[in-house]
Amino acid sequence: MVDVSTLELPVLDVSDPALNGPEFHVAMADAASRSWLARQPLGYLTLDRDAGELFFRNRSATFPGQLLAELYGIDRGPLREEIDRNILHIDGPDHARLRKLVNPFFSPRASDRWRPAMRGFLDQLWAAAEGDSCEFVDAFAKPYPSLTIATVMGAPTTDAPRLHEWSNWIQRQFDGPSLTAERPRIEQAVEEFYAWCDELLAVRRTSPRGDLVSVLIAAEEDGDRLSDVELVNLVLNVLIGGVDTTQAQLAHGLRLFAEHPDQWALLATEPERVPQAVEEVLRHEPIDRARA
Protein backbone atom coordinates (compact mmCIF):
# COMPACT_ATOMS: atom_id res chain seq x y z
CA MET A 1 0.00 0.00 0.00
CA VAL A 2 1.34 3.44 -0.95
CA ASP A 3 1.76 6.06 1.78
CA VAL A 4 -0.07 9.14 0.46
CA SER A 5 2.39 11.45 2.21
CA THR A 6 5.14 10.21 -0.13
CA LEU A 7 3.28 11.12 -3.33
CA GLU A 8 4.14 14.13 -5.47
CA LEU A 9 0.81 15.96 -5.45
CA PRO A 10 -0.36 19.45 -6.43
CA VAL A 11 -0.81 21.72 -3.42
CA LEU A 12 -4.05 23.67 -3.06
CA ASP A 13 -5.25 25.78 -0.12
CA VAL A 14 -8.99 26.24 -0.70
CA SER A 15 -9.18 28.63 2.27
CA ASP A 16 -6.84 31.10 0.53
CA PRO A 17 -8.87 34.32 0.10
CA ALA A 18 -7.08 34.94 -3.20
CA LEU A 19 -8.79 31.86 -4.64
CA ASN A 20 -12.09 33.55 -5.29
CA GLY A 21 -14.34 33.41 -8.34
CA PRO A 22 -12.46 32.72 -11.58
CA GLU A 23 -9.13 32.33 -9.75
CA PHE A 24 -10.56 29.40 -7.80
CA HIS A 25 -11.66 27.59 -10.95
CA VAL A 26 -8.32 28.20 -12.66
CA ALA A 27 -6.43 26.76 -9.68
CA MET A 28 -8.75 23.76 -9.46
CA ALA A 29 -8.50 23.06 -13.18
CA ASP A 30 -4.71 23.21 -13.00
CA ALA A 31 -4.59 20.80 -10.06
CA ALA A 32 -7.13 18.43 -11.66
CA SER A 33 -5.06 18.30 -14.85
CA ARG A 34 -2.13 16.91 -12.86
CA SER A 35 -3.80 14.51 -10.40
CA TRP A 36 -7.09 13.25 -8.97
CA LEU A 37 -5.79 14.19 -5.52
CA ALA A 38 -4.34 17.42 -4.10
CA ARG A 39 -2.61 18.24 -0.84
CA GLN A 40 -4.09 20.99 1.38
CA PRO A 41 -3.03 22.34 4.80
CA LEU A 42 -5.12 19.96 6.91
CA GLY A 43 -5.37 16.95 4.62
CA TYR A 44 -6.15 16.04 1.03
CA LEU A 45 -8.74 17.07 -1.56
CA THR A 46 -10.20 14.74 -4.18
CA LEU A 47 -10.46 16.31 -7.63
CA ASP A 48 -12.32 13.50 -9.33
CA ARG A 49 -15.98 12.68 -8.82
CA ASP A 50 -15.59 8.91 -8.84
CA ALA A 51 -12.80 9.12 -6.26
CA GLY A 52 -14.91 11.37 -4.06
CA GLU A 53 -17.83 8.96 -4.19
CA LEU A 54 -15.51 6.07 -3.34
CA PHE A 55 -14.45 7.76 -0.12
CA PHE A 56 -18.00 8.83 0.74
CA ARG A 57 -19.25 5.26 0.38
CA ASN A 58 -16.35 3.64 2.24
CA ARG A 59 -17.62 2.51 5.65
CA SER A 60 -14.15 2.82 7.16
CA ALA A 61 -14.03 6.55 6.33
CA THR A 62 -15.22 8.97 9.02
CA PHE A 63 -16.16 12.64 8.90
CA PRO A 64 -13.28 14.79 10.28
CA GLY A 65 -15.36 17.42 12.09
CA GLN A 66 -14.42 16.27 15.59
CA LEU A 67 -10.74 16.09 14.65
CA LEU A 68 -10.93 19.63 13.27
CA ALA A 69 -12.52 20.79 16.53
CA GLU A 70 -9.72 19.19 18.54
CA LEU A 71 -7.05 20.77 16.34
CA TYR A 72 -8.54 24.20 17.08
CA GLY A 73 -9.08 23.61 20.79
CA ILE A 74 -12.87 23.21 20.75
CA ASP A 75 -13.08 20.78 23.67
CA ARG A 76 -16.08 22.07 25.64
CA GLY A 77 -19.07 24.40 25.42
CA PRO A 78 -22.21 24.54 23.24
CA LEU A 79 -20.34 24.20 19.96
CA ARG A 80 -18.47 21.08 21.09
CA GLU A 81 -21.73 19.55 22.30
CA GLU A 82 -23.33 20.24 18.92
CA ILE A 83 -20.34 18.79 17.07
CA ASP A 84 -20.43 15.55 19.08
CA ARG A 85 -24.21 15.21 18.57
CA ASN A 86 -24.10 15.90 14.83
CA ILE A 87 -25.23 12.86 12.83
CA LEU A 88 -22.12 13.33 10.66
CA HIS A 89 -20.01 12.36 13.67
CA ILE A 90 -22.15 9.44 14.83
CA ASP A 91 -21.05 6.15 13.31
CA GLY A 92 -22.04 2.51 13.30
CA PRO A 93 -25.37 1.23 14.65
CA ASP A 94 -26.33 4.59 16.20
CA HIS A 95 -25.95 6.34 12.84
CA ALA A 96 -27.93 3.61 11.07
CA ARG A 97 -30.69 3.87 13.70
CA LEU A 98 -31.05 7.64 13.28
CA ARG A 99 -31.06 7.39 9.49
CA LYS A 100 -33.68 4.64 9.59
CA LEU A 101 -36.00 6.78 11.70
CA VAL A 102 -35.56 9.88 9.55
CA ASN A 103 -35.27 8.54 5.98
CA PRO A 104 -38.99 7.95 5.27
CA PHE A 105 -39.65 11.69 5.56
CA PHE A 106 -37.12 12.43 2.81
CA SER A 107 -38.20 9.91 0.18
CA PRO A 108 -39.03 11.36 -3.29
CA ARG A 109 -42.71 10.68 -2.74
CA ALA A 110 -42.71 12.36 0.67
CA SER A 111 -40.91 15.37 -0.79
CA ASP A 112 -43.56 15.88 -3.47
CA ARG A 113 -45.98 17.35 -0.95
CA TRP A 114 -43.72 20.39 -0.52
CA ARG A 115 -43.40 21.22 -4.22
CA PRO A 116 -46.43 23.57 -4.36
CA ALA A 117 -44.95 25.62 -1.51
CA MET A 118 -41.53 25.60 -3.18
CA ARG A 119 -43.00 26.88 -6.45
CA GLY A 120 -44.94 29.50 -4.52
CA PHE A 121 -41.75 30.82 -2.91
CA LEU A 122 -40.07 31.05 -6.32
CA ASP A 123 -43.05 33.00 -7.68
CA GLN A 124 -42.88 35.29 -4.66
CA LEU A 125 -39.15 35.94 -5.08
CA TRP A 126 -39.54 36.42 -8.83
CA ALA A 127 -42.26 39.00 -8.27
CA ALA A 128 -39.99 40.88 -5.87
CA ALA A 129 -37.15 41.06 -8.40
CA GLU A 130 -37.00 44.41 -10.18
CA GLY A 131 -36.17 45.04 -13.83
CA ASP A 132 -34.80 42.58 -16.36
CA SER A 133 -31.89 41.40 -14.21
CA CYS A 134 -31.01 40.73 -10.58
CA GLU A 135 -28.21 39.54 -8.33
CA PHE A 136 -29.23 35.88 -8.27
CA VAL A 137 -27.57 34.87 -5.01
CA ASP A 138 -29.19 37.64 -2.96
CA ALA A 139 -32.53 37.53 -4.77
CA PHE A 140 -33.04 33.75 -4.97
CA ALA A 141 -30.24 31.46 -3.77
CA LYS A 142 -30.14 32.85 -0.22
CA PRO A 143 -33.83 33.38 0.68
CA TYR A 144 -35.36 30.40 -1.13
CA PRO A 145 -33.81 27.52 0.88
CA SER A 146 -34.63 28.98 4.30
CA LEU A 147 -38.23 29.71 3.29
CA THR A 148 -38.59 26.10 2.16
CA ILE A 149 -36.87 24.63 5.22
CA ALA A 150 -39.03 26.73 7.57
CA THR A 151 -42.12 25.29 5.88
CA VAL A 152 -40.77 21.73 5.99
CA MET A 153 -40.00 22.13 9.70
CA GLY A 154 -43.44 23.54 10.43
CA ALA A 155 -42.08 26.93 11.48
CA PRO A 156 -43.42 30.35 10.45
CA THR A 157 -41.83 31.64 7.24
CA THR A 158 -41.13 34.86 9.15
CA ASP A 159 -38.43 32.85 10.94
CA ALA A 160 -36.68 32.10 7.62
CA PRO A 161 -34.14 34.98 7.89
CA ARG A 162 -33.07 33.78 11.34
CA LEU A 163 -32.79 30.20 10.13
CA HIS A 164 -30.60 31.37 7.25
CA GLU A 165 -28.33 33.34 9.59
CA TRP A 166 -27.99 30.49 12.10
CA SER A 167 -27.26 27.99 9.35
CA ASN A 168 -24.50 30.12 7.85
CA TRP A 169 -22.84 30.72 11.20
CA ILE A 170 -23.06 27.14 12.47
CA GLN A 171 -21.75 25.83 9.14
CA ARG A 172 -18.52 27.71 9.85
CA GLN A 173 -17.61 25.00 12.36
CA PHE A 174 -16.11 23.19 9.36
CA ASP A 175 -13.82 26.13 8.53
CA GLY A 176 -10.69 26.07 10.68
CA PRO A 177 -9.88 29.81 10.58
CA SER A 178 -13.49 30.66 11.50
CA LEU A 179 -13.31 28.39 14.53
CA THR A 180 -10.47 30.51 15.86
CA ALA A 181 -11.66 33.98 14.88
CA GLU A 182 -15.44 33.63 15.19
CA ARG A 183 -16.05 30.93 17.79
CA PRO A 184 -18.15 33.15 20.13
CA ARG A 185 -20.56 34.06 17.30
CA ILE A 186 -20.79 30.44 16.14
CA GLU A 187 -21.58 29.29 19.68
CA GLN A 188 -24.16 32.05 20.03
CA ALA A 189 -25.88 30.78 16.89
CA VAL A 190 -25.91 27.22 18.30
CA GLU A 191 -27.47 28.37 21.55
CA GLU A 192 -30.05 30.56 19.83
CA PHE A 193 -31.06 27.74 17.51
CA TYR A 194 -31.36 25.24 20.37
CA ALA A 195 -33.66 27.62 22.28
CA TRP A 196 -35.77 28.25 19.16
CA CYS A 197 -36.03 24.54 18.37
CA ASP A 198 -36.99 23.63 21.95
CA GLU A 199 -39.95 26.01 21.67
CA LEU A 200 -40.99 24.54 18.32
CA LEU A 201 -40.77 21.00 19.71
CA ALA A 202 -42.96 21.98 22.66
CA VAL A 203 -45.60 23.40 20.32
CA ARG A 204 -45.60 20.37 18.02
CA ARG A 205 -45.90 17.92 20.92
CA THR A 206 -49.32 19.39 21.70
CA SER A 207 -50.28 20.41 18.14
CA PRO A 208 -48.75 17.89 15.72
CA ARG A 209 -48.98 18.41 11.97
CA GLY A 210 -47.45 16.72 8.94
CA ASP A 211 -44.20 18.69 9.17
CA LEU A 212 -40.70 17.40 9.88
CA VAL A 213 -40.70 18.17 13.62
CA SER A 214 -44.05 16.43 14.15
CA VAL A 215 -42.92 13.39 12.16
CA LEU A 216 -39.65 13.14 14.08
CA ILE A 217 -41.48 13.35 17.42
CA ALA A 218 -43.74 10.50 16.36
CA ALA A 219 -41.02 8.45 14.61
CA GLU A 220 -40.73 4.94 16.02
CA GLU A 221 -38.91 1.79 14.93
CA ASP A 222 -39.36 -1.43 16.94
CA GLY A 223 -40.42 0.62 19.94
CA ASP A 224 -37.43 2.96 19.65
CA ARG A 225 -38.05 6.71 19.60
CA LEU A 226 -35.80 9.74 19.33
CA SER A 227 -34.65 11.51 22.49
CA ASP A 228 -35.04 15.29 22.85
CA VAL A 229 -31.30 15.77 22.22
CA GLU A 230 -31.50 13.65 19.07
CA LEU A 231 -34.59 15.52 17.88
CA VAL A 232 -33.01 18.96 18.22
CA ASN A 233 -29.78 17.95 16.52
CA LEU A 234 -31.49 16.15 13.65
CA VAL A 235 -33.54 19.29 12.99
CA LEU A 236 -30.29 21.28 13.07
CA ASN A 237 -28.69 18.84 10.59
CA VAL A 238 -31.64 19.32 8.23
CA LEU A 239 -31.40 23.10 8.58
CA ILE A 240 -27.69 23.29 7.78
CA GLY A 241 -27.84 20.72 5.01
CA GLY A 242 -30.98 22.20 3.48
CA VAL A 243 -29.92 25.85 3.57
CA ASP A 244 -26.15 25.84 3.00
CA THR A 245 -26.06 23.07 0.41
CA THR A 246 -29.07 24.34 -1.51
CA GLN A 247 -27.99 27.98 -1.74
CA ALA A 248 -24.51 26.94 -2.90
CA GLN A 249 -25.78 24.48 -5.50
CA LEU A 250 -28.42 26.87 -6.85
CA ALA A 251 -25.75 29.45 -7.61
CA HIS A 252 -23.33 26.78 -8.84
CA GLY A 253 -26.00 25.22 -11.08
CA LEU A 254 -27.02 28.53 -12.60
CA ARG A 255 -23.40 29.31 -13.48
CA LEU A 256 -23.03 25.93 -15.15
CA PHE A 257 -26.20 26.39 -17.16
CA ALA A 258 -25.08 29.88 -18.20
CA GLU A 259 -21.85 28.35 -19.49
CA HIS A 260 -23.78 25.54 -21.26
CA PRO A 261 -26.85 27.25 -22.78
CA ASP A 262 -27.71 24.17 -24.85
CA GLN A 263 -28.42 22.32 -21.60
CA TRP A 264 -30.38 25.28 -20.23
CA ALA A 265 -32.71 25.10 -23.25
CA LEU A 266 -33.82 21.64 -22.11
CA LEU A 267 -35.63 23.23 -19.17
CA ALA A 268 -38.19 24.62 -21.61
CA THR A 269 -38.19 21.95 -24.31
CA GLU A 270 -37.46 18.64 -22.56
CA PRO A 271 -37.68 19.06 -18.77
CA GLU A 272 -37.62 15.28 -18.25
CA ARG A 273 -34.02 15.29 -19.55
CA VAL A 274 -32.78 17.90 -17.09
CA PRO A 275 -31.28 15.43 -14.56
CA GLN A 276 -29.38 13.70 -17.37
CA ALA A 277 -28.23 17.07 -18.72
CA VAL A 278 -26.91 18.12 -15.32
CA GLU A 279 -25.02 14.85 -15.05
CA GLU A 280 -23.50 15.37 -18.49
CA VAL A 281 -22.36 18.88 -17.60
CA LEU A 282 -20.79 17.74 -14.33
CA ARG A 283 -18.97 14.84 -15.93
CA HIS A 284 -17.26 17.29 -18.28
CA GLU A 285 -16.44 19.76 -15.49
CA PRO A 286 -13.93 18.16 -13.09
CA ILE A 287 -13.22 21.55 -11.57
CA ASP A 288 -16.84 22.01 -10.57
CA ARG A 289 -17.27 18.45 -9.35
CA ALA A 290 -14.46 19.04 -6.90
CA ARG A 291 -16.11 22.17 -5.50
CA ALA A 292 -19.53 20.55 -5.35
Image (spheres, rainbow, N blue to C red):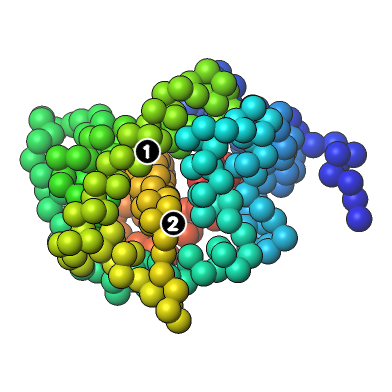
Q: Closer to the camera, 73 or 123?
A: 73
| Quadrant of the image containing the N terminus | bottom right
Query: Could you say where residue 163 lies in the image, as x and y percent from the top left?
Result: 28, 39
Instruction: Please say whether residue 8 is visible from this viewpoint.
Output: yes
User: Height in image: 161 above or below 214?
Assistant: above
Assess disc 2: are there few (<14), some (14-19) or many (≥20) residues with their C-alpha within 10 Å of its C-alpha: some
Residue in the image at 16% along x and 45% along y: 157
Furthest toward the left, the residue is: 127
Mark 2 highlights which residue? 230
Quadrant hosting residue 206: bottom left
Label 1 SS: helix
Label 2 SS: helix
Residue in the image at 38% along x and 56% along y: 228
Instruction: Please say whether residue 251 is visible from this viewpoint.
Output: no
Query: Could you say where residue 29 lies in the image, as x and y percent from the top left?
Result: 62, 37
Quadrant hosting residue 118: bottom left
Task: Residue type at mark 2: give it.
Answer: Glu
Mark 1 highlights which residue? 167
Query: Could you say where residue 27 lies in the image, as x and y percent from the top left?
Result: 62, 30
User: Height in image: 9 above or below 122?
Assistant: above
Quadrant hosting residue 255: top left
Task: Residue type at mark 1: give it.
Answer: Ser
Residue in the image at 48% along x and 59% along y: 280
Q: Count of labels shown? A: 2
Tell me how far mark 1 sits from mark 2, CA to CA: 18 Å
